[in-house]
Amino acid sequence: MYLLGIGIVLLLMKWQEIGPVATWSWWIVLAPFGAAMAWWAWADWSGYTKRKAMEREDQRKQDRINRQREAIGQKARPAPTRRR
């Protein structure tokens, strides 16, 4: 997401001819968009995106269980760690 933001800022600066970016090649200005596409392709291919989503869901589930335990007066447990 950072690469996309950098690409948008550079694109706007090139379009408005602001600062040193106005003299840069279009290839340099558009490079962050290509890098973002490569990152997203790798993240989907490697399972990184799915793994992070599963970790968020596991954390939400554990938080919900801990809130329910605290509501009935039991001690909350720490979230389990996942082995790789």
Image (cartoon, rainbow, N blue to C red):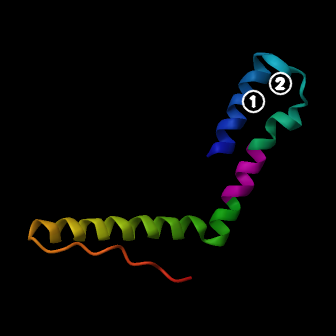
The CA distance from mark 1 to mark 2 is 7 Å
Earlier in the chain: of badge 1 and badge 2, it is: 1
Residue 36 as seen in the image, left or right of residue 57: right
Rendered position, 12 above or below 38: above
- Residue positioned 72% across, 36% down in the render: 7
Where residue 43 sits, quadrant-wise, is bottom right
Q: Which mark is residue 21?
A: 2
Image location (x, y in percent) of residue 2 = 64, 43
Residue 79: image quadrant is bottom left
Q: Which residues are magenta?
A: 33-40
State the image quarter where residue 21 is shown.
top right
Which residue is outermost to the bottom? 83
From the image, tell me which residue sits under label 1: 10
- Left or right for 68, reference 64: left
Residues 44 and 72: in front is: 72
Where is residue 27 shown, x and y percent of the image? 88, 37
Query: Where 15 sits versus 8, above or below?
Result: above
Q: Is residue 25 above or below residue 33?
A: above
Q: Residue 24, image x and y in percent?
A: 89, 27
